[in-house]
Image (cartoon, grey):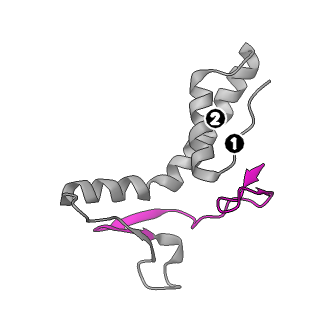
């Protein structure tokens, strides 16, 4: 069960974020799913801080942020395979717990552990 970030109260609502793919344009992270509805290239989801960061670091941070939707999907798919392995071998393994931690950090919902 998820918790609301502001109140800490339980929520049964699905996690909703701007759908990918995301791309970068300088220090802006662009939601390509919004192409045509806001402008020709998409909608800016966020702008990476330029405060004291080198141009190289700004671009690298934007790339990491833009990859988030794809990384989340890939990690969820990997966890499905890891969970099968855990079930087969009788318990949670480090990679599975690390994947659950990362998915929970991204979504606010912890995937179930294999018993």
Across and down, in percent, residue 46 comes to: 42, 69
Please identify the residue farthest to the top as the structure is shown. 89
Which picture quadrant has residue 86? top right
Q: In this rendered view, identify the residue nearer to me: 73 or 50.
A: 50
Q: Sort mark 1 into few (<14), some (14-19) or many (20+) by Cα contacts within 10 Å.
A: some
Circle number at residue 79: 2
Across and down, in percent, residue 10 comes to: 79, 55
Asked whether disc 2 touches disc 1, contact meaning CB atoms under 8 Å apart, the reply is: no
Circle number at residue 102: none
Distance from the alpha carbon under mark 2 to that under mark 1: 12 Å
Residue at horizontal 78%, vertical 48%? 1
Q: In this rendered view, identify the residue nearer to me: 43 or 55.
A: 55
Across and down, in percent, residue 19 comes to: 57, 65
Q: Sort mark 2 into few (<14), some (14-19) or many (20+) by Cα contacts within 10 Å.
A: many
Q: In this rendered view, identify the residue nearer to me: 9 or 109.
A: 9
- Secondary structure category for the residue under label 1: loop
Which picture quadrant has residue 114? top right
Which picture quadrant has residue 102? top right
Q: Is residue 20 above or below residue 43?
A: above
Residue at horizontal 53%, vertical 85%? 37
Circle number at residue 110: 1
- Secondary structure category for the residue under label 2: helix
Residue at horizontal 70%, vertical 28%? 83
Residue at horizontal 58%, vertical 47%? 105
Question: Which segment is the magenta one?
Answer: 1-30
Magenta stretch prevailing secondary structure = loop
Q: Earlier in the sequence, mark 2 or mark 1?
A: 2
Please state the total of marks drawn on the protein image: 2
Magenta stretch contains residue 87? no
Left or right, 81 with respect to 26, comes to right
Magenta stretch contains residue 29? yes
Please identify the residue farthest to the front as the structure is shown. 7
């Amino acid at each position: 069960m998820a918790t609301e970030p502001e109140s800490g109260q339980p929520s049964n609502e699905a996690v909703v974020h701007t759908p990918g793919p995301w791309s970068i344009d300088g220090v802006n992270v662009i939601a390509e799913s919004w192409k045509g509805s806001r402008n020709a290239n998409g909608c800016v989801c966020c702008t990476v801080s330029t405060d004291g960061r080198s141009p190289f670091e700004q671009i690298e941070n934007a790339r990491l942020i833009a990859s988030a939707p794809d990384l989340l999907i890939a990690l969820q798919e990997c966890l499905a395979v890891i969970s099968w392995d855990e079930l087969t071998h009788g318990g949670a393994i480090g990679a599975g717990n690390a994947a659950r931690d990362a998915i929970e950090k991204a979504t606010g919902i912890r995937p179930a552990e294999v018993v």
